[in-house]
Image: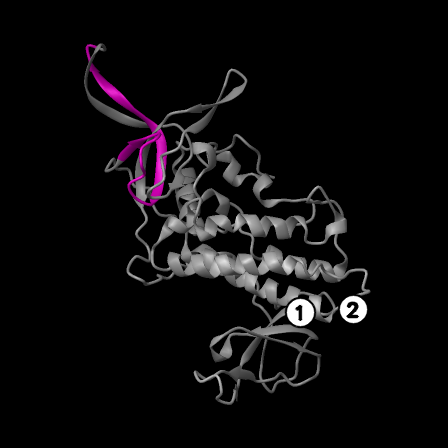
Amino acid sequence: MKLLNTYSMNDDNTRRQVFWLLKRLSSYSLWKRKRDAWAIFAATYEQAVKTWPENDPDALDPNNLVRIYEALCLYDQGIEELGKGHRHVWRTNGDLYQLYKPVDIVKSRFFGRYHERGIQEWPYPPKVEQINKLRLAEEYAGTEYITEPQDMVANITNVNFLFSDILYESEFYSLPRPIFPKNLPMVPNEQKKMISTGDIVPCDGIWEPGKLSLDFKWKVIPVGIGDFVNKGCFNYLISGARAPFINVFESHEMEKKSIEWRLIWEDTRYCDGTIPDESEYFLDDNPGKRITCRSGEHCPHSGRWATIAGGQQQFAHVEAGKLMPEAAQYQGDMFAPIKPIPATWKLLMRDDGGSVYIS
């Protein structure tokens, strides 16, 4: 277990890790993965609502579908904008900020009678938990720290919180921790842009809170600007928002303090419409590969399968031993016949509750 008060923003390795983490959490690839995971969850939840018997004691609430697809719509709109370098989607009126409303409602009402005041109190039945795991695939710990802060207070004050179990562990599930590359990039040490609490943030990027020290002659006469002294954890700030306060614990109370913010790294990714290779943010993909099967091959496990062949995501329930189906190639003309094409299918959920990854 990682304990609090073990990390310092004056430690070079800690600074490098936080710098990398914030770039990962604000990456297009991570948010696109969140969107795709939610789409799989939405389709599976809807299929369960349509096919599970109405008298099934574990039947899912169809009313959740409204919020589920509201969230998917916000994802689609936000991801399209983010892919153009438009990070206003994380401001309070932006699509990716507004996600928290429907997503939190679905989470708090996922399987109503197993909740108290919107909090899960008991383990879900096995087949409900299978679908819940698809919902959990959308969650990446810390993404809420990229959005515009509430009440003008920085999202992250204490660096230790970024590494604590509080972010990753729950009574009923655990979120995967990111795997850091062996060679983390250096943190820039420049003072190109400096703002204070209340100023308009001039550009998207990673900023460091602190104070500028003054150089004195004879220890009494200020003669120039000295070093920038760190006063907290890096934060991702969004252009057009106001630079926030930071929370400081003093005299047994938490107080908001004005602070100066130094630009560490300006985020200009995706502004030219291209998405760079961001595979370094997902080194945790390597330990396990999802089970796949080609059209015409015998299905190895009964369950729900998916493919993106044909230009859009398609789903099929296939029983073990049956031949895997072809996918549908939709034509531009809505009246044109649908063309079957070979596809590679990935296993999303097994009927027997087993793993969907190659052991």
Q: Is 197 on the left or on the right of 327, as rendered?
A: left
Residue 219 part of the magenta segment: no
Query: Residue at 43% across / 33% down in the picture?
Result: 152
User: Quick one: quadrant of the N terminus?
Assistant: top right
Judge the density around disc 2: few (<14), some (14-19), many (≥20) Cα neighbours within 10 Å: few
Residue 191: x %, y % from top left:
25, 35
Q: Is 151 on the left or on the right of 289, as rendered?
A: left
User: Disc 1 designates what residue?
Assistant: 47
**Residue 200 can be seen, yes or no:** yes
The answer to which of 131 and 19 lies nearer the viewer is: 131
What SS does tag 1 mark?
Answer: helix
Query: Residue at 62% across / 44% down in the picture?
Result: 169
Q: CA distance from mark 2 to mark 1?
A: 12 Å
Residue 195 part of the magenta segment: yes
The answer to which of 263 and 21 lies nearer the viewer is: 263
Q: Is 191 on the left or on the right of 97, as rendered?
A: left
Q: Which residues are magenta?
A: 194-218
Judge the density around disc 1: few (<14), some (14-19), many (≥20) Cα neighbours within 10 Å: few
What SS does tag 2 mark?
Answer: loop
Q: Is residue 180 above or below residue 290?
A: above
Q: Amino acid at mark 1?
A: Gln
Query: Residue at 74% across / 62% down in the picture?
Result: 127
Specify the quadrant of the image occupied by residue 211. Answer: top left
**Residue 183 can be seen, yes or no:** no
Q: Main secondary structure of the magenta part?
A: strand
Q: Is residue 254 above or below residue 118?
A: above
Query: Residue at 74% across / 45% down in the picture?
Result: 121
Specify the quadrant of the image occupied by residue 259. Answer: top left
Residue 77: x %, y % from top left:
44, 59
User: Disc 2 designates what residue?
Assistant: 53
Residue 41: x %, y % from top left:
60, 62
